[in-house]
């Protein structure tokens, strides 16, 4: 009759959506739109390859263009991975909470009264760990979104 909120797919999905939306918002706000999009699609090498092609340098041009297209493909995979985070967050939380609820129902059915008590404590521990994992992954993805991905040049003294 009474179920945990996270055993309904809508609650973990809404938490995952909000987490991913805020991660993308923080990245856009901290780095700016063009610099943040450059973390996905690095088109600098493609531009250099086209520039070398216009200058008549064929070998660097073909290398730059081919690596530029590889970078575009990797950028598409990176965008896809950001959308897959929503699915990953949702089903990790939903699956673990639903499995705990099913375990409690089976134990309560097989051996009522005393036997389910340790499993309630175990379910509280699993719920706490899932909250910790969800928050930790959100923090890690947020730090990755806030960190610029360009190489820093060190000055020699």
Image (cartoon, rainbow, N blue to C red):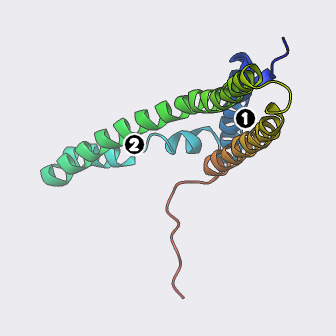
Q: Which residue is drawn at 71% across and 16% down?
A: 10
**In this view, the mark in front (2 or 1):** 1
**Image quadrant of residue 101?**
top right
Q: Which mark, by number, is residue 123? A: none
Residue at image position (49%, 35%) is 81
Q: Residue at x 62, y 33 (%)?
A: 92
Please report the residue visible at 49 percent of the width from the left and 62 percent of the height from the top: 151
Residue 43 is marked as 2
Give residue 16's quadrant in the image.
top right
Q: What element carries label 1?
A: helix
Which quarter of the image is occupied by the C terminus? bottom right
Question: Within 10 Å of the Cα at label 2, are there few (<14), some (14-19), or many (20+) other Cα atoms?
Answer: some
Image side of residue 157 versus residue 43, left or right: right
Say which of 84 and 4 sits in front: 4
In this orientation, does residue 14 appear?
A: no
Q: Which of 83 and 151 is in front in this view?
A: 83
Determine the secondary structure under disc 2: loop
List x then y, in percent, for residue 47.
34, 44
Mark sitting earlier along the chain (2/1): 1
Residue 22's tag is: 1
């Amino acid at each position: 009759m009474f179920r945990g909120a996270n055993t309904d797919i809508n609650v973990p999905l809404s938490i995952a959506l909000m987490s991913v939306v805020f991660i993308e918002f923080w990245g856009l706000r901290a780095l700016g739109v063009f610099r943040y999009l450059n973390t996905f699609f690095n088109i600098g090498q493609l531009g250099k390859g086209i520039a070398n092609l216009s200058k008549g340098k064929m070998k660097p041009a073909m290398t730059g263009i081919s690596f530029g297209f590889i970078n575009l493909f990797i950028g598409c995979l990176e965008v896809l991975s950001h959308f897959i985070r929503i699915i990953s967050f949702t089903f990790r939380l939903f699956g673990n909470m639903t499995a705990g609820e099913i375990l409690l129902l089976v134990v309560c059915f097989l051996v009522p009264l005393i036997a389910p008590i340790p499993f309630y404590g175990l379910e509280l521990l699993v719920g706490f760990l899932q909250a910790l994992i969800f928050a930790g992954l959100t923090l890690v993805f947020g730090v990755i979104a806030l960190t610029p991905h360009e190489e820093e040049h060190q000055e020699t003294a």
